[in-house]
Amino acid sequence: MRGLKLIPENINLGFIQRRTLFFIFSALLVISSIGLYVSKGLQYGIDFKGGILIEIKTTDGAANIKAMRKNLSDLKLGEVGLQEFGAPDEVLIRIQAQEGGEKVQQEAIAKIKDALGSGIEYRRTEVVGPKISDELLWDGIYAVGAAIFAILVYVWFRFEWQFGLGAVAALTHDVISTIGIFSLLGLEFNLTTVAAILTIAGYSINDTVVVFDRVRENLRRYKTLPFPELLNNSINETLSRTMMTSVTTLLALFALYILGGEVLRGFSFAMIWGVVIGTYSSICLAVPVLLYMKIERRGNVGGSNEEAAAE
Amino acid sequence: MIYFAKWKIILILGICLLGVIFAAPNFLSSKQAASLPSWMPNKQVSLGLDLQGGSHLLLEVAVDSVLSERLDAVVDTMRTTLRKARIKYTGLGVDGLAASVTIKDGTQAEQARQLMRNLDVDFTVEVTDNNRITLQLTDKAIRDRRTAAIEQSIEIVRRRIDETGVREPTIQRQGENRILVQLPGLDDPERVKRLLGKTAKLSFHLVDERQVPELGGRVPPGSMLMPSADEPGPSGRPRMYMLKKKVMLSGDTLVDSQPTFQDNQPVVSFRFDTVGGKRFGKVTSDNVNKLFAIVLDGKVISAPVIREPILGGSGVISGQFTVQGAQDLALLLRAGALPAPLTILEERSVGPGLGADSIAEGKIASLIGMALVVAFMVLVYGRFGLMADIALLANIILIGAALSLLQATLTLPGIAGIVLTIGMAVDANVLVFERIREEVRAGRTPISSIDAGYSRAIKTIIDANVTTLIAAVLLYQFGSGPVRGFAVTLAIGIITSMFTAIMLTRLMVVVWLRKTRPDSLPI
């Protein structure tokens, strides 16, 4: 009973030869992501923008969103967004942050509840005042920044600084492009998205470290093998594992995306994207980047200074 | 790598067994779990408010209002002291965290300084330009006042919430001047919010019965205008009362307050302590037939005529109350006044329906995700995949046990963390299996392939997992509420998956290897 092989044995794809292609693709991806972020911006959720979010379920059949929208816009609370949320009798209402501090937000809720009337189950009410939304945004930015820095330090410590830079280049690419796809599709960017981004960072670096580990091992083992070939071999040798783990993770994530409910959909979407882009960047960015960094081929990478045969 | 000492085997199986034992209460209903004898593990995973339904409120105490009250009070004492000593002054007032005054006659400045110095220990006295005296609140006093205000606020918030009958509320201080309130099972916190939104400072004042128009529309010194809580005035705005500024009695001497009925109208009865009761008796005796105003948070609730002295130390507040309004007011008076106003910075309430749906959806997603991963592993690695699957199951059980033991809160993002872990947990096994495949390809014997596979993969597994752990720790550090729940399950999942992959699967592989002594590996 031999198992199925996702990747044929002795596969040898030319990842390193095609590096220019990958670099151009990734550069375009990063540039367009930044461009989108600057021009279109992000659809911040109330966590970061402040405001009111109410999820309701009508108890007597499908919700009449049109009527609700009219009722609510009559309240003159500024921007009011209504959308069906998972089922015809479930509606998500978003109200922009009200001018005039924290107290006014509470008054607005009372007005909304009045305007919606009876026959409604309030499934979720979230109010984030301007003070908290500011703090949450900064906390999120600090967290992502600190994570990237901590990972850089760890990889530097375990490998060498060149590897650390390669890993962080790939990581930053993943984070920026995730922000880009959220901007492109106009998906809500909230606290769980930040959680997803941090997890993507963890996942992507996990992938990268596995390939780097193999590069380091091969550097010790094959002291005269040309560097590009050595890198390419390392990628191919670990390709089967890379694909396996991506597939199992994606299987779980698709289950979550489809069955996990409306609230988690944004999170699982970000993660699915992150797994795909993280896998790509580990193979096609993090490793080829090493080519441009002077990695000394000593007998023992990260260890003694004993000079070994050069390329 | 393929040798296990006996104690190690016992340890590994022991941990798994403990996992099963500690995870087991989660399969019971909460009632059944609570009725387990105390020597048995009976802790269940505690569900976050987003899963069990409930309200999360983040409150801010306006601590600085306590300081400004303190300063206002000192200005009052300064005024009376200087007047008593017949010292002429000008420019008396509050300036930031200080109160200052200018003495008109420079020769009296020294005398004034002496008086001010003995006024209040919380202030330092400074003289500038010979005749300008500044009383500065000391840093220690500021700190003490703030701490006292927060602590007292927490106490009052707790009392008010306890009175509403919410079960197992969590009320804790957060940061400098914030209070986090979590109310499980309460999905409509309107009443609690209304109760917390009131400072509930009660005071009794005599009404200044001189008519305002006679005074040319000016409010005489020592009196003040105050709106009625519910009586409309002529212009549609609330009716205004003119009250004497002097507080005859305040709410802190109240010992009890209950909603009741008088002439079929809801009213609130109250009772003073001995000191307050005596004072109340004296005030009512001295002012028979005068109007006596009851003021709550700067609004006049009612201003009845004192018909006769009230000597029993108790009375009734009548106003235009609803039944609920009378209940709320009685509750507020019983629980006491907040030292400073509270504002709600953040509210997150989830109804029980959504929570239950989230749990159901999370369960299905986990089960289907797990089934897919399990099937895929068997498809790719055959018998070895099956072993990895058993380890995966053990992993989930261990996560459940760890969550129950640590009493960590499982949130909706936490469920996402578990589903994600299901997908990523097999990674450690995948690393080992792929390595074994490579070693087999390199022509090694089964035993030596497995040995080399494990010893070479372990370093990679650790490196790869530590980086994810870093992300999880930072997420916990910076995240709040539900996101923290995600960080917790992710971190626990990483640790348990390393254990199950390196220890449990390896044990299974080794046992199988010893039993069958295969010529080739089915991998």
Image (tube, rainbow, N blue to C red):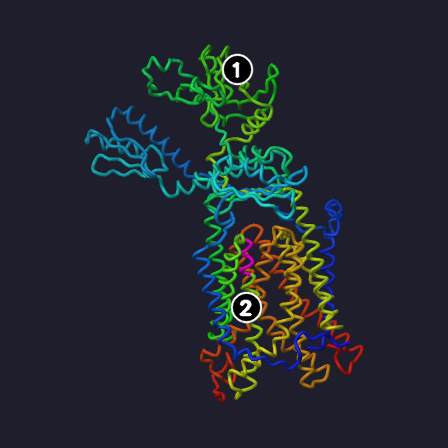
Q: Nearer the viewer, residue B512 or A286?
A: A286
- Which residue corresponds to the image point at 76% horizontal and 82% vertical from the top-left? B520
Circle 1 residues within 10 Å: few <14, some 14–19, many ≥20: some
**Residue B305, can we see it?**
yes
Quadrant where the N terminus of chain B lies? Answer: bottom right
Tell whether A20 sits left or right of B486.
Answer: left
The residue closer to the viewer here, A67 or B504, is A67
Query: Which residue is painted at 46% across and 35% down in the image?
Result: B340
On screen, residue B428 above or below A266? below
Query: Looking at the image, is A256 positioned above or below residue A311?
Result: above
In the displayed structure, does residue A168 sit left or right of residue B410?
A: left
Q: Quadrant of the C terminus of chain B?
A: bottom right
- Which secondary structure, mark 2? helix
Q: Is residue A10 magenta?
A: no
Tell me the amino acid under the disc marked 2. Answer: Ile
Q: Main secondary structure of the magenta part?
A: helix
User: In x, y percent, where is residue B289?
Assistant: 46, 10
In the rendered structure, are the residues bearing label 2 and label 1 in contact, judged by CB atoms less than 8 Å apart?
A: no
Q: CA distance from mark 2 to mark 1?
A: 78 Å
Please state which amino acid type lies under the numbered disc 1: Leu
Residue sitting at the far right: B516
Q: Position of residue A205 (x, y in %)?
A: 54, 68
Residue A244 image position (x, y, % from top left): 65, 70
In this picture, which residue range is highlighted in magenta? A190-198
Q: Nearer the viewer, residue A245 or A222?
A: A245
Residue at the spot of label 2:
A205
Report the label total. Answer: 2
Report the disc number at residue B311. 1
- Identify the image quadrant of residue B475: bottom right
- Residue drawn at x 60%, y 35% is B162
Q: Position of residue B84 (x, y in %)?
A: 29, 23
What residue is rendered at 54% in x and 18% in y? B318
